[in-house]
Image (tube, helix red, strand yellow):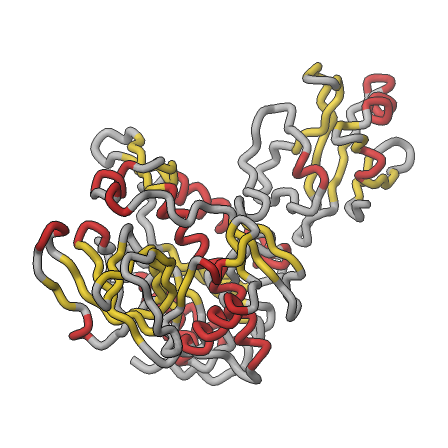
Amino acid sequence: MSTATVTVALSPQPITVSYDELIVNGQWNQALLASWRVGGNHPMLICHCHPLGAIAMHIVERPRGSGRYHLADNPDGSPLEHMLACPRYHVDDPDGPRNTKSVGTPGVEWTNEGSANERVDIRINLFPQAPEQSTENAVNEEQPVWVSVLKNPQTGAPAGVSVSRAESEFGGLLREWYRIGFSHARRSLSKCPTDEQVLRGMWRSMLDRRVTVNKAPIVTDAYVPYGRITRLREGERKILLGRIDEVPFREQVVGGGKDGVQWRYELVGIDCAWTLVVPNRFRPKHHSMNGRFCLVDAEYHKDEWRALRRPACAIVHPQGGVWLDSQYEARMYEFLIGQGATVEKPLLPSAQWFHYKPDFVLPNESPPVLIEVWGLPDTFLTYHEQKAKKTATYAYGQKQGKIRFLEWNAQDPTDWARFVRSFRSVKQGNGQEYRYRI
C-alpha cells in the first residue's frame, strides 16, 4: 500500500486521495478521472511525494492503450521529479517516455541489506571467454554497451562511446562486493575502516557465502591471496581480488613472448601477495593500477597468475576505506578530511538526497552540505544533461533551506580556488574555525 497522496483542486472544496485509489492494476482509474472531468472541468492535481515541494499534474484526455484518461506532469519548469517510491513514477506518461532514472541496479539482488546477515547476488557471466580467445579485438568489440554520447566539437554531431559489456559488469561485481565488505568492516569496528580492513571484510563475506553470482557462492570461483592457500593447480582459472602493491617498483615491464609486452604486479591479499602478470593489451590505458583494489580473471602458470582480460580497478582510500570514482574525487576527499569534516560517500541514490547520489555529503553541517565533483567535459551529452538536472534540483533544495550545495568543475583549472572560498563560507557561517592550509 502506498502512502503517497494527491490533492485534487475541485470546487468548492479540494480533496485528498491516495494513489491506491488513483491506480488500479497498474492503470489509471478511468471512472475516477472521468468524474473529475464532468462539465468540462480541468482540476489541478498536486503530488506530495517529493520532500522539496509539490509536483503539479493535470488530466489528459487522450485514448492510449486501455485508457482514455491519464495524468501528466505540468510543464512548469520545476526541476522536481517524482520519487522512485511514488506510484506515479511507474505509470506511463501520455506525452511520451520521461527521462526517468533506473530503478535499482540491473542484475543485482540484495537480501537483508543493512543487517549482519545481508547478502548480495550478481547476475553476470564470470568467465565469458576461453583464454585463447582473449584477443585485443575481443576486449574492444565484445558486446559493446552504449554508455554516453560525445559531441564532436567541430560539427556538433554526436559520436558513440562504448565499452565492453563484460568489462562493465565486472566492474559492477567489484562495486557490489566492496559494498558488502565495507558494511562488514564498519560493523566489526568502532571507527572508520582502513582499505586493508575493507579488503578483509570482502574476504570474510566471500567465505561466509554472502556474495553469490547467479545464486552460486563466489567462493567456489574466486580467491583472495591468502598464505594458507598452498595447493594451486597449473592452469586453474579463478577470479582474483586484492590490492595492487603501491610501491612504485612493483609495476614492472617484463619480456615479450607470444603476449608481447607484459606488466608484473604484486596482488596483496590477507597477509600475503601473489604475482600477477597483465599483458599490455589488458592494462588500463588511463591510469596506473598501483594502490587500487583489483578484480581480475586470471589463470595460474608457473608460480604466477596471468590476466585473461582487463582487470576492474577501484580507488579505495586508506583512511576511511571510502570508494572513490576518480582521482578528482580523491583530491576532494583528502581536502575534506584534512579540514576535519565528517564525510559520507553515498554509493546509491537516496530519497534523502532527492533520489540522487551526491559525490560527498557533510551530514554534520546545518543544513547538510552536498558536494558534486564534475570530472567530465560538457561535450558528453548524457553527462551534461544529468549534471543540469542535478544542479537544478540541488539549487531548489538550497532555496528551500534543506541543503547547502557546493560544486567543483575539475575541468576548469581556476575553479578549485572558487570552491575553497565557498567551503570557507559554509564553515564560517556555521561558526566553525576554518583550517584550510595552502
**Residue 28 point in image, percent of width and height:** 77, 28
**Residue 155 point in image, percent of width and height:** 23, 29
Q: Nearer the viewer, residue 384 or 284?
A: 284
Q: Nearer the viewer, residue 250 or 303?
A: 303
Q: Quadrant of residue 189?
A: bottom right
**Which quadrant is the N terminus positioned in?**
top right
Q: Residue at x 50, y 49 (%)?
A: 390
Q: Quadrant of residue 404?
A: bottom right
Locate residue 198 relative to residue 260 in the image: left or right. right
Q: Nearer the viewer, residue 159 or 427?
A: 159
Locate residue 25 relative to residue 332 in the image: left or right. right
The residue most toward the right is 12
**Which quadrant is the C terminus positioned in?**
bottom left
Q: Quadrant of residue 232?
A: bottom left
**Residue 58 point in image, percent of width and height:** 72, 29
The residue most toward the left is 256
